[in-house]
Image (cartoon, grey):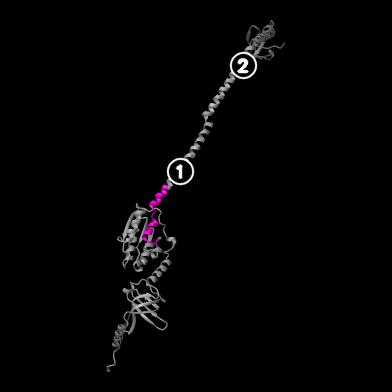
Amino acid sequence: MSQSMMSVSSLNTKIKSLLEATFMHTMVEGEVASVTYHTSGHLYFSIKDDKSSIKCVMWRSSVAKMKFRIEKGMHIVVEGSVSVYTPRGEYQFQTVRIEPYGQGALALAFEQLKKKLKEKGYFDATHKKPIPKQIEKIALVTAKESAALYDMLKIIEKRWAMVEVYIVDTLVQGEQASEQIANALMYADTLGVDVVVVGRGGGSAEDLWAFNEERVADAIYAMKTPTVSAVGHEVDVMISDFVADLRAPTPSAAIEMILPDSNEILYALDGMAERFTTLLHQQIKEKEVALQYLESRLLQIAPTRKLDFLQQQFKDVGVQLNQVMGYKVEQYALQLPKLQTQLEQNLSFVLREKEQVFEFIKEKFMLHNPKLKSKKGWAEVTQDGQKIELESLKVQERFSISDAKTKVEAVVVGTTAL
């Protein structure tokens, strides 16, 4: 066999060694032609330009570090090396890092997650819970040794020191931070506080990235307690800001936004007390005037006053009556002798008239006295107290015969007509 000849395997091995030695730590830019996220965690895709394409692979350990997902048609820059699969003589680009072309990976990941969560309704105003006006308990989800926690506690002490504070410690940056923040939020939701503040101080985009993770957004969305996102400085905008019920530009600002200022309240109370005192004095004065008026009206229409008036009228009438009676008595006293003489004369006249009438009646009575009218031999026949004729009697009937001096009871023995 000629020395220039070699086996397929040898050729592929030489090509592998040559390519992998030549194209180490290479960066290639192109458009994603196809993409497959395998269940194993590996990423298989290809990139192309207007003339050719190349297959690429990224192993699971590198995929886990990616902040965004690549999609077909996306313009990307891949970093890695060329590798050859000798059994089939195929080569591919073994990728260790992917960046969006002309755009940072974090910025793209941010926009991708923002779009996804918006479509799921995580940002809807109807899901936002109102922050209570009066807060008695508050939970602070942040690193317990951080300057942000110190600043928040200082503002709490200054503004509303009587609030009960729960500190829930968590990592706020690094690979494990998003998981710890999500767990800390779920724990804070069980404490029965009025509001939860989650956040940290400023830092780079990578330092703050834990608050842009989907698991943190899920935890905030599931919160039953009103939640405030307070991450970084005012220019820093996190996914947690969109999902939370309230976004604060800084941790300190979050406390100022949700807790009242005790000094302002004291000033307001002083003003209210002064206005209340002035109003109370004014109302008391008005009531005194009204009371005086009612008292005067009551005196005018009071029953005792009316009774006094009637009693006085009664006295006046009594005096007038006594005067009239005295005058009448005097008048009658002057007329009494004359009236007495007239009375005596009238009585004498009446007596004489009555005596004459009596004599007349007496004479008339004497004239009509039945006893004086009876004649000898004549009697009155009665039956049951009624005058009857003798011819009406029948045999055996009883009847009475009486004259002026005697009454006889008799029975009919027989009758004879004359």
Mark 2, other Cα within 10 Å: few <14 / some 14–19 / many ≥20: few
Query: Where in the figure is residue 384, as x and y percent of width and height?
Result: 63, 15
Q: Judge whether residue 264 can be spotted in this image.
A: yes
- State the mark number for residue 278: 1
> Quick check: 196 above or below 346?
below
Magenta segment: 247-270
Whichever of callouts 2 and 1 sits on the residue coming sooner in the sequence is 1
Dot 1 surroundings within 10 Å: few (below 14), some, or many (20 or more)?
few
Q: Position of residue 298 (x, y in %)?
A: 52, 33
Q: Which amino acid does label 2 sit on?
A: Tyr
Q: Is mark 2 on a helix, strand or loop?
A: helix
Residue 267, relative to residue 350: is it above or below? below
Q: Quadrant of residue 176?
A: bottom left
The C terminus: image quadrant: top right
- Farthest residue toward the right? 418
Q: Magenta-highlighted stretch: main secondary structure?
A: helix
Q: In this view, does 398 lie to the left or right of 93?
A: right
Q: Does the magenta stretch include residue 260?
A: yes
In the image, taking residue 240 as reference, residue 365 lies left or right, namely right
Residue 324 figure quarter: top right
Q: Which amino acid does label 1 sit on?
A: Thr
**Number of callouts in the render?**
2
Q: What element carries label 1?
A: helix
Q: Which of 26 and 42 is in front in this view?
A: 26
The answer to the question of whether label 2 and label 1 lie on touching residues, with beta carbons closer than 8 A, is no
Q: Can residue 411 be seen in this view?
A: no
| Mark 2 lies on residue | 327
